[in-house]
Amino acid sequence: MKILGGPYIGGIEQEIFTFRPYMSWLYTGLKHHYSEFYISTHQHSMFLYDWPGIKFVPVDNKYYDPSVTGIMCNIVNNKDYLGLAKQSKATIEGNDVVHCLIKYTKYDNFIVPIHKKLFQIINIKKSTPGNIVVVARNQAQELHEKLAVALDAKLLGYSCGSYDLIKAVLCAKLVVCEVGPWTALCNLHKIPVLSWGDSNISMYKSGGVYSFNNKHNSVIPGNDFNLIISGIKHLLGGIE
């Protein structure tokens, strides 16, 4: 029998935070029970799944929008998604394909429960660390720009592409971002990170489920520029 996960047609942040950990959980638990393991995702994201024996069913490029913050791109509805799912399954020969879909939603980024997520290190060729990186979700706001100028940092967004953005984050001396998937990614890889925000911040703080025991992790409530700068200076003092 064969197993297919996907298709995934959302943005890069939920791919690293939701879909990839879900696929990792399925793969680890089921790889010895199926003859072939397929993942349907964007070709730009296939580097995330460098696990032995993985085969791919590419998603059409028209559904590729790394800036989408959810797990579905904005141009499909439930009917469209189910149609894409059938097409993905139809590309695999045989009638013995077990299809593991993620529930269609545009808004709920926590559709996969934590116990069905297995976070694994992303294997990516790293350069010498040294840059401070400010990651802007969607369009860069004034706060991102002010922080980049004050820190003499690189301001990066989704326009630079999935691979380049992830590589820049994993090679950074320090990452500054809104609390969320990029915080979790940095914590997983033990990259120094300072995040700010108001929602669910306890999950990313020291001892939180997404802290991954990163000693150089700081979360600032709110979005006050001076508090963020002060926190960054304190964090840099501990790693320099």
Image (cartoon, grey):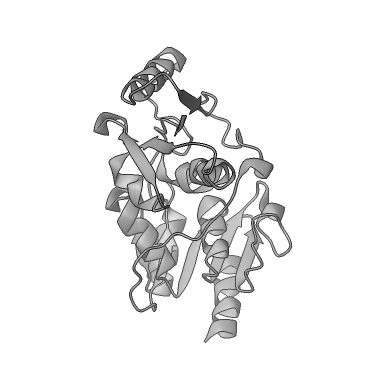
Q: Farthest left residue? A: 61
Residue beneath the point at 48% across and 48% down:
16
- Which of 224/130 is in front? 130
The number of numbered badges drawn on the structure is 0
Q: Farthest right residue? A: 207
Residue 178 shows in this picture: no
Q: Quadrant of residue 130?
A: bottom left
Q: Farthest bottom residue? A: 240
Residue 77 shows in this picture: yes
Residue beneath the point at 32% across and 55% down:
163
Relative to 4, is 45 above or below? below
- Place of residue 5 in the rendered image (x, y in percent of width and height, measured from the top left): 46, 33
- Which of 227/202 is in front? 202
Question: Is 75 on the left or on the right of 72, as rendered?
Answer: left
Q: Quadrant of residue 184?
A: bottom right
Relative to 159, is 103 above or below? above
- Which of 106/231 is in front? 106
- Place of residue 124 in the rendered image (x, y in percent of width and height, measured from the top left): 37, 63
- Place of residue 28 in the rendered image (x, y in percent of width and height, measured from the top left): 56, 48
Question: Is 157 on the left or on the right of 215, as rendered?
Answer: left
- Place of residue 145 in the rendered image (x, y in percent of width and height, measured from the top left): 39, 60
Residue beneath the point at 31% across and 58% down:
164
Relative to 235, is 16 above or below? above
Q: Farthest top residue? A: 79
